[in-house]
Image (cartoon, rainbow, N blue to C red):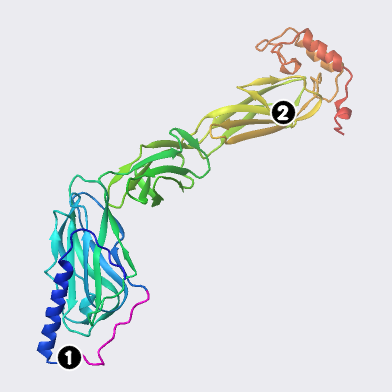
């Protein structure tokens, strides 16, 4: 037998006993009969429990709320009583309603006779079936106690059951195997939430956007959240309290997006994070090589690299790097047009790339040939090439005798340095050297 006793409860048991005697006597007189051997005999249950239900709940200051006292796995119960202790500075009892469980076996007595003490924080109930030899089996609510939370209080307050007694239909005490107390949390503080990632002003490309946030509440075990993108709800769910939560938003449309996180606790108190602005760039830069041209043959030992690079799209992140790769070699960083010098004879593959802020890369590629000294373009360096250089000697762009092909060192003038390059390559037959036949 388990009976929790706390406080000055003398007389409650006497009062219940008196009610039981009166109700039994009333039944005997009214029926002019006594229980027979066929009257139902109480059978002790395997594990009878009396509990506060729900075991825990969260309310706001000033809220009304209910607490049930329920019995589970009882056999042949004919009467019950109990006292619930509470903190009167945090809540007040506004009423008590008898549960329906006992009444399923017949008429009862005790409703309206509950004792409410809002000064000391005690409420006592006691109910009995009027008929003798009658009881209920199973589980159900003994009493519902109605509370109102006081304003401007906040904490977790205990609800303690004491002086709990169950009696069977023949007046024998039923063993209670466990009495389970409860709590009520009065919450006057809204939760908080902070976005941990992404950071403000960060860029994304064609990748999922993950939002990680930290939500906290002083009462709730978990919080409802909504993630807003550009002012519209985008994702929602439940987030564990005081834990980092990560949500995958998928790939967002190109351009800027404003992200915020809204959280709400059990009692409807809410808060919202500061906004984070991110940028999405879905398109790589576009690159076009203007010179050297695809399939062209150049007479110098160099070529002028001229190209355009444009970061396209509705909201481009901007190009942060350009580079070229010659014949699969090491990338060379450039900031604009440049001269590629000291080229060996024959064909070359040139790749020019631009990289934007989100590391998207766009490239263009050309294949060209270099035949140093072959100004005439016949695949050989001979007197005809020397003649062409002589005609253009000492010229610069704009002069009437200017010949760009005679500028063998790509310095924008034809002079002795170009003559020197022609001399070094005089007699070369590129149709043989470059396997053109």
Q: Where is residue 236 drawn, in percent x and y?
A: 38, 51
Query: Image check: 317 left or right of 277?
Result: right
Q: Where is residue 26 drawn, in percent x and y?
A: 11, 84
Q: Nearer the viewer, residue 400 or 332?
A: 332
Classed neighbour count for the residue bearing mark 1: other residues with Cα under 10 Å, few (<14), some (14–19), many (≥20)? few
- Give the SS element for disc 2: loop
Q: Quarter-wise, where is residue 201 in the image?
A: top left
Q: Nearer the viewer, residue 44 or 279?
A: 44
Question: How far is mark 1 from mark 2, CA to CA?
Answer: 109 Å
Which residue in the protein does label 2 denote?
A: 330
Q: Nearer the viewer, residue 30 or 423?
A: 30
Classed neighbour count for the residue bearing mark 2: other residues with Cα under 10 Å, few (<14), some (14–19), many (≥20)? few
Task: Count numbered badges in the picture.
Answer: 2
Query: Image check: 164 left or right of 29?
Result: right
Query: Image check: 224 left or right of 14?
Result: right
Q: Going 22% across and 80% down the picture, which residue do you hit?
A: 171
Q: Is residue 113 magenta?
A: no
Q: Where is residue 346 drawn, in percent x and y?
A: 81, 28
Majority secondary structure in the magenta region: loop
Which residue in the protein does label 1 denote?
A: 34
């Amino acid at each position: 037998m388990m009976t929790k006793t706390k406080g000055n409860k003398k007389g409650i048991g006497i009062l219940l006993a008196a009610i039981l005697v009166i109700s039994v006597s009333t039944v005997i007189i009214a029926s002019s009969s006594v229980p027979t051997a066929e009257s139902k005999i109480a059978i002790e249950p395997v594990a009878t429990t009396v509990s506060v239900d729900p075991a825990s709940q969260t309310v706001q200051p000033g809220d009304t709320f209910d607490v049930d006292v329920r019995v589970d796995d009882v056999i042949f119960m004919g009467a019950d009583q109990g006292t619930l202790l509470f903190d009167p500075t945090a809540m007040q009892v506004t009423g008590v309603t008898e549960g329906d469980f006992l009444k399923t076996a017949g008429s009862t007595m005790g409703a309206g006779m509950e004792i409410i003490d809002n000064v000391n924080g005690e409420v006592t109930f006691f109910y009995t079936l009027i008929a003798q030899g009658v009881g209920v089996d199973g589980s159900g609510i003994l009493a519902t106690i109605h509370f109102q939370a006081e304003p401007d209080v906040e904490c977790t307050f205990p609800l303690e059951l004491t002086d709990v007694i169950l009696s069977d239909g023949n007046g024998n005490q039923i063993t209670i195997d466990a009495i389970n107390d409860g709590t009520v949390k009065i919450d006057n503080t809204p939760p908080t939430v902070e976005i941990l990632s992404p950071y403000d002003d960060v860029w994304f490309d064609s990748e999922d956007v993950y939002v990680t946030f930290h939500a906290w509440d002083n009462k709730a075990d978990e919080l409802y959240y909504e993630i807003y993108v550009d002012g519209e709800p985008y994702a929602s769910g439940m987030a564990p309290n005081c834990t980092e939560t990560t949500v995958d938003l998928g790939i967002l449309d190109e351009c800027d997006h404003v992200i915020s996180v809204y959280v709400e606790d059990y009692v409807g108190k809410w808060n919202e994070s500061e906004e984070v602005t991110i940028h999405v760039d879905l398109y790589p830069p576009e690159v076009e090589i203007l010179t050297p041209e695809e399939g062209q043959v150049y007479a110098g030992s160099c070529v002028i690299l001229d190209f355009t690079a444009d970061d396209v799209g509705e909201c481009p992140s901007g190009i942060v790097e350009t580079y070229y790769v010659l014949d699969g070699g090491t990338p060379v960083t450039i900031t604009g047009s440049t001269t590629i010098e000291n080229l060996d004879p024959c064909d070359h593959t040139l790749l020019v790339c631009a990289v934007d802020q989100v590391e998207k890369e766009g490239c263009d590629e050309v294949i060209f040939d270099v035949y140093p000294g072959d100004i005439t373009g016949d695949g050989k360096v001979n007197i005809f090439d020397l003649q062409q250089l002589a005609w253009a000697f000492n010229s610069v762009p704009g002069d009437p005798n200017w010949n760009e092909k005679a500028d063998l060192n790509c310095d924008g003038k034809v002079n002795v340095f170009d003559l020197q390059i022609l001399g070094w390559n005089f007699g070369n037959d590129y149709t043989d050297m470059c396997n053109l036949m």
